[in-house]
């Protein structure tokens, strides 16, 4: 038996990277998954790879009507939604004086508005199911901040606040809401050139002296989506190797 047997999940930004890892591991644990992304080609390729327990749906997380379509199609295919993983996100890192209004609005629309619309839209489906778990992927920048991270940090702090507010409101319906706060994650893109050298230096300030593997974040997301975390809601789960433990 898998940890997510019987669960029906929508995962945003799931065509590639961390979202794709979530999708693969969810299905391995018994869930049926809607892989949603603006990149439909990559989403469909992943769904084909995973098999019959996954479908690919195009989703612009900042579009309310698109969200309604995704929930409806997921219900038609698999039944009421019981898990939402708000994983889609963008990160624009610039000094304050160089950050544009366009940069800020884009970050808001994907990282903040997208989370709000996702939670709002899945609630009726979760009420129908009688149970639900919403996992909002935030960041350590949703708890602290750093230079050049103003737009990103603002949106991720908002996710933290929305998570707490939604948890207090939805608990009466057996719907749990938690946020996950990754630190520095090891990805192929981060292994190249100057970025790789910079991140290796940062590792020395992390108590565990390494970056997180993507699967380590997925393992935490699975825990929060599963019944193993049935009494956890409104909480912030940090997966950063101790990076912000002294802040």
Image: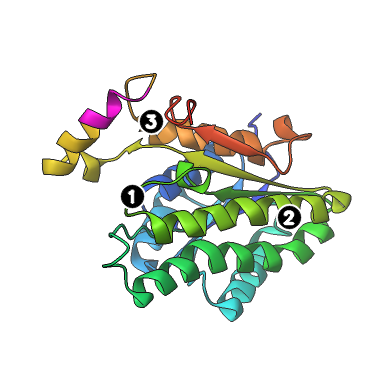
Range of magenta residues: 201-206
Q: Are marks 3 and 2 in contact (CB under 8 Å)?
A: no
Q: Secondary structure at mark 1?
A: loop
* Nearer to the camera, 110 or 87: 110
Where residue 165 is drawn, which disc sits there?
2
Which of pointers 3 and 1 lies earlier in the amino acid sequence?
Answer: 1
Which of pointers 3 and 2 lies earlier in the amino acid sequence?
Answer: 2
Q: Quadrant of residue 152?
A: bottom left
In the picture of the structure, the residue carrying the numbered disc 3 is 212
Q: Residues within 10 Å of mark 2 (few under 14, many from 20)?
A: few
In the picture of the structure, the residue carrying the numbered disc 1 is 147
**Residue 10 placement, left or right of 167:** left
Which of pointers 2 and 1 lies earlier in the amino acid sequence?
Answer: 1
Marks 3 and 2, how far apart in space? 28 Å
Q: Are marks 3 and 1 in contact (CB under 8 Å)?
A: no
**Residue 115 placement, left or right of 106:** right
Q: Would you say residue 58 is visible in this rendering? A: no
Q: Is residue 168 above or below residue 223?
A: below
Q: Secondary structure at mark 2?
A: helix
Expressed as whole percent of the image width and height from the top left, the position of residue 151 reads 41, 61
Q: Would you say residue 190 is visible in this rendering? A: yes
Expressed as whole percent of the image width and height from the top left, the position of residue 204 reads 28, 23
Q: Tell me how the rendering is colored.
A: rainbow
């Amino acid at each position: 038996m898998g940890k997510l047997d019987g669960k029906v999940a929508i995962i945003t930004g799931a065509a590639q990277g961390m979202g794709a890892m979530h999708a693969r591991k969810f299905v391995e644990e018994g869930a049926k998954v809607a892989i949603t992304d603006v990149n439909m080609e990559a989403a469909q390729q992943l769904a084909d790879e995973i098999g019959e327990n996954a479908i690919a749906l195009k989703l612009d997380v900042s579009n309310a009507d698109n969200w309604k379509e995704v929930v409806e199609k997921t219900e038609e295919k698999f039944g009421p939604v019981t898990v939402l993983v708000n994983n889609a996100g963008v990160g624009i890192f610039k000094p304050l004086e160089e950050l544009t209004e366009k940069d800020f609005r884009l970050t808001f629309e994907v990282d903040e508005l997208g989370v709000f619309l996702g939670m709002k839209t899945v609630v009726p489906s979760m009420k129908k199911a009688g149970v639900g778990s919403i996992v909002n992927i935030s960041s350590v920048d949703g708890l602290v901040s750093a230079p050049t991270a103003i737009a990103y940090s603002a949106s991720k702090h908002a996710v933290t606040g929305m998570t707490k507010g939604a948890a207090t409101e939805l608990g009466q319906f057996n719907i749990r809401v938690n946020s996950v706060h990754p630190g520095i994650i090891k990805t192929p893109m981060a292994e190249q050139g100057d970025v790789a050298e910079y991140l290796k230096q940062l590792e020395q300030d992390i108590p565990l002296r390494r970056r997180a593997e993507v699967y380590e974040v997925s393992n935490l997301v699975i825990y929060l989506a599963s019944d193993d975390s049935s009494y956890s809601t409104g909480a912030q789960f940090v997966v950063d190797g101790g990076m912000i433990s002294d802040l």
